[in-house]
Image (cartoon, rainbow, N blue to C red):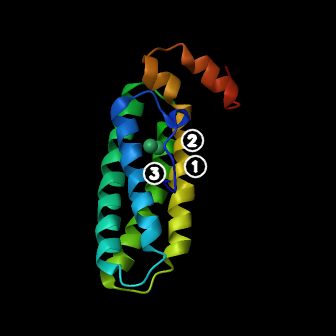
Amino acid sequence: MQFIEWTTEMSVGAETLDGHHRMIIDCLNRLHPLLDAEGNDAEVKAVVATLEDFVLVHFSEEEQEMKRAGYPDWRAHKELHDRMYDVVFALKSDVERGDTVDGRRLFELIENWLVTHILGEDRKYVPFVATHAAAPLAQWKRSNGREV
Ligand SMILES: [Fe+2]
Ligand SMILES: [Fe+2]
């Protein structure tokens, strides 16, 4: 049983971006049991480095895709990415320095941000990315309290 299960409701309608999300979730699943035991420093370091790589590539490609698809709120979405990346980078720096990190607290933070982000923010661009059509704009504005 994985700590976080991938479900189809996490799909954002784009195969590449779904693949990234699955890789990020896989990293979180690998990190989870490592935090329960001592002496896993090298492995924790490797998983966190991989996570940071995936997150960086994913955010960049997702931002490109949102822009290309005409998603109106891509700038605000990018700001959320930037803040999440800062946390992931700080975690990586702590691990690399060999500092004592509160792994569990940081794991919860990343898990909440990343998974909640996929199910919340990322799903808002689905109608745009899935169809590349202009029609979803009115629906998006209505569901996000914007003027139509
Ligand atoms: Fe994403
Ligand atoms: Fe995102």
**Residue 62: percent from left, percent from top:** 38, 39
The residue mark sitting in front, 2 or 3, is 2
Q: Is residue 127 left or right of residue 60?
A: right
SS under mark 3: helix
Q: CA distance from mark 3 to mark 1?
A: 12 Å
The residue mark sitting in front, 3 or 1, is 1
Q: Residue at position x 47%, y 66% from top?
A: 32
Which numbered disc, 2 or 3, marks the residue that appears first in the sequence?
A: 3
Q: Are marks 2 and 1 in contact (CB under 8 Å)?
A: yes
| Residue type, label 1 | Thr
Q: Residue at position x 71%, y 31% from top?
A: 145
Q: Nearer the viewer, residue 42 or 98?
A: 42
Q: Which residue is mark 1?
A: 116
Q: In the figure, 103 relative to 119: above or below?
A: below
Q: Which residue is mark 2?
A: 119
Q: Is residue 93 left or right of residue 108?
A: left
Which label was assigned to residue 86? none
Q: In the figure, 71 relative to 59: above or below?
A: above
Quick check: can you spot residue 146?
Answer: no
| Residue type, label 3 | His
Q: Residues within 10 Å of mark 1 (few under 14, many from 20)?
A: few
Q: Which residue is mark 3?
A: 81
Q: In the figure, 78 relative to 144: above or below?
A: below
User: For disc 2, does the CB lie below 8 Å from ligand 1?
Assistant: no
| Residue type, label 2 | Leu
